[in-house]
Image (cartoon, grey):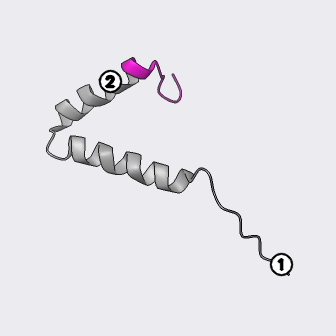
């Protein structure tokens, strides 16, 4: 069985971990109400809808 040793141009797992860390740092000391406002602002900025809406 051969192994495939490709060099990745894009690492989705690393990107997701970086994004998650950035969000954690930005929201670490927020209250629940501040967190809700943060999420609403980010969704508005990106024009993304919540799942099921």
Measured from the top left, where is residue 47 in percent x and y?
46, 18
Reading the image, the residue beneath label 2 is: 40
Q: Residue at x 38, y 18 (%)?
A: 44
| x 32%, y 30%: residue | 39
Which label sits on residue 2? 1
The magenta stretch spans which residues? Answer: 44-53
**Which quadrant does the N terminus fall into?**
bottom right
The dominant secondary structure in magenta is: loop
**Element on which disc 1 rests:** loop
Of residue 38 and residue 32, the one placed in the foreground of this image is 38
Image-based side of 26 in relation to 5, left or right: left
Q: Earlier in the sequence, mark 2 or mark 1?
A: 1
Instruction: Indicate yes or no whether the magenta region holds residue 52.
Output: yes
Which of 52 and 11 lies nearest the eye of the viewer? 11
Indicate yes or no whether the magenta region holds residue 1: no
- Left/right placement of residue 40 relative to residue 5 reads left
Q: How many C-alpha atoms fall within 10 Å of the one at disc 1: few (<14), some, or many (≥20)? A: few
């Amino acid at each position: 069985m051969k192994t495939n040793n490709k060099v990745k141009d894009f690492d989705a797992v690393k990107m997701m971990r970086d994004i998650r860390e950035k969000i954690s740092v930005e929201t670490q000391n927020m209250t629940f109400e501040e967190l809700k406002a943060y999420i609403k602002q980010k969704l508005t900025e990106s024009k993304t809808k919540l799942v099921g809406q």
